[in-house]
Image (cartoon, rainbow, N blue to C red):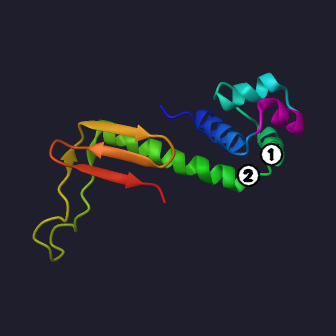
Amino acid sequence: MILLRRLLGDVLRRQRQRQGRTLREVSSSARVSLGYLSEVERGQKEASSELLSAICDALDLRMSELLREVSDELALAELAQSAASDTVPSLGVPPGRGLERPLLNPVRVTTVTHRPEEHVTIKAPSKAVDVVAA
């Protein structure tokens, strides 16, 4: 199961660390307890929209940027989750549309490797398909 609070926490932590700031600095600026901010970053607490707004302000980050990054991570996690339990969908043309066979045949996925940030590799028995977030 993909938990949105974990993805939000991961993105918030990365943003804070990119700025070289400590939990203490951000919690003070956002007027939230250090312990609570830590729990939000670890995905243990659900942050309200008001709290997310305060944290974003403290990080000088637009809420839309935060949510866009979380959305990208969610899409990758969903792709990895579905690939681990299903087949890679065919990218071909429906039958009777002019092509004799699909462009790609569906393959059974044997392993999925998720590399945090931007890269998911889906390995099939005879080939691998790389999916890179834009």
Answer yes or no: do the residues labelled 2 and 1 have beta carbons within 8 Å?
Answer: yes
**Residue closer to the observer: 109 or 131:** 131
Q: Quadrant of residue 35?
A: top right
Name, please, the residue furthest toward the left: 100
Side of 115 where 124 appears, left or right: left
Indicate the position of residue 48 as horizontal and vertical percent values: 76, 37
Indicate the position of residue 92 as horizontal and vertical percent values: 22, 65
**Residue closer to the observer: 18 or 119:** 18
Residue at x 67%, y 49% (from the top left corner): 66
Q: Is mark 1 on a helix, strand or loop?
A: helix
Q: Is mark 2 on a helix, strand or loop?
A: helix
Any magenta on residue 22?
Answer: yes
Segment colored magenta: 21-30
Q: Which residue is denoted by mark 2 in the rendering?
A: 63
- Identified by mark 1, the residue type is Ser
Q: Which residue is denoted by mark 1 in the rendering?
A: 53
